[in-house]
Image: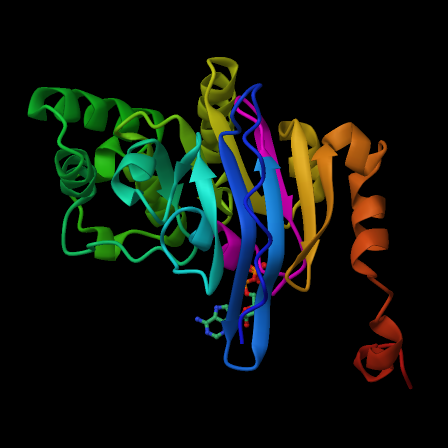
Amino acid sequence: MTSPVPPRPPADPGSVPALHTWGLFKRFGPKTAVEQFELVIPTGSYFGLVGPNGAGKTTTLSMATGLLQPDAGTAFVHGVDVWRDPATAKRQLGILPDGLRLFDRLTGAELVTYAGLLRGMDPDVVRRRTDDLLDVLGLTGDANKLVADYSAGMTKKIGLATALVHAPSVLVLDEPFESVDPVSASHIRAILADYVANGGTVVLSSHVMELVERLCSHVAVMTEGRLVASGTVAEVGGGDLQRRFAELVGAEEVTEGLSWLRPSRG
Ligand SMILES: Nc1ncnc2c1ncn2[C@@H]1O[C@H](COP(=O)(O)OP(=O)(O)OP(=O)(O)O)[C@@H](O)[C@H]1O
């Protein structure tokens, strides 16, 4: 049932992308979630992956980061095949998955510490970084609270802390600003901007075009499991990413069908 995968792309003698997916394919029962998806994410870019609900963003990012086995295809992190050499690839990755399932019987501080120790880091370094991360993310006061008792936004932030503690070179963040309050969102934006300014690569998925247009250097648009545009934000959006997005994914006005919902209707 899998789609044929084209031969591997020739190695680019120039710069190796931070993340390169190749021929990714995934079905869930009769539903093809992602099909023949090639995505090249340049090192040092701030990359937005956008698409309507169900477009396949989470499935793509999960396969690209070793969280979900593709039916076909693979992904490379700085040239390392995620599915052939997962240990090496994952050392370079910091991941904030969608619908994050955390060990929520740990406190926030314990969870970040655990993530660092699991990566084989020195305990003193882990302790210092945990304190730093909880501080910048506004979680110091809740450091000793169980993650099970965190709000949705706090859970998102502690998940981000676990993704950052080992100082990865590529950050893959599924909806990092969802449920996060404006002050924390501005802190996260500052952390990510500084990270990219210093050579890191950020890949984030989002539904918010205005946010992607403002933050990202590059963007890819996907719909129905396929990539329909990819490039710099200026190339893809042409100055109005929201309008371009609607054109690419075929969005239409739908309120006519809900005329019964209008209170003014006699
Ligand atoms: N575990 C699963 N089992 C069955 N179908 C799935 C599963 N995960 C995803 N799908 C289906 O695959 C398609 C792509 O889903 P995916 O979560 O990747 O989309 P998305 O672009 O991240 O959507 P959203 O913006 O709503 O989060 C959808 O049709 C979804 O119903």
Q: Is residue 162 above or below residue 232?
A: below
Whether residue 84 is in magenta: the answer is no
Picture residue at 8% right of the left edge, 26% below the top: 123
User: Relative to residue 118, is residue 204 drawn left or right?
Assistant: right
Q: Position of residue 132 (x, y in %)?
A: 26, 22
Q: Looking at the rendering, in which quadrant would you find the N terminus?
A: bottom right
Q: Position of residue 49 (x, y in %)?
A: 61, 44
Q: Work out whether residue 114 or residue 76 is closer to the camera in this orientation and state it.
A: 76
Can residue 88 be seen at all in this image of the molecule?
A: yes
User: Relative to residue 34, is residue 120 drawn left or right?
Assistant: left
Q: Position of residue 206 (x, y in %)?
A: 59, 47
Q: Is residue 167 above or below residue 250?
A: above
Q: Position of residue 238 (x, y in %)?
A: 85, 33
Q: State the extent of the magenta-drawn residues as a range.
A: 41-61
User: Relative to residue 38, is residue 81 drawn left or right?
Assistant: left
Whether residue 58 is in magenta: the answer is yes
Q: Looking at the rendering, in which quadrant would you find the C terminus?
A: bottom right
Residue found at the very far left of the displayed protein: 123
Q: Is residue 51 above or below residue 86?
A: below
Residue found at the very far top of the displayed protein: 198
Picture residue at 14% right of the left edge, 27% below the top: 121
Q: Work out whether residue 93 or residue 114 is closer to the camera in this orientation and state it.
A: 93
Q: Work out whether residue 72 or residue 212 is closer to the camera in this orientation and state it.
A: 72
The picture quadrant where one finds residue 14 is: top right
Picture residue at 46% right of the left edge, 22% below the top: 200
Q: Work out whether residue 256 or residue 207 is closer to the camera in this orientation and state it.
A: 207
Q: How many labels sit on residues? A: 0
Can residue 179 be seen at all in this image of the molecule?
A: no
Report the colour scheme: rainbow
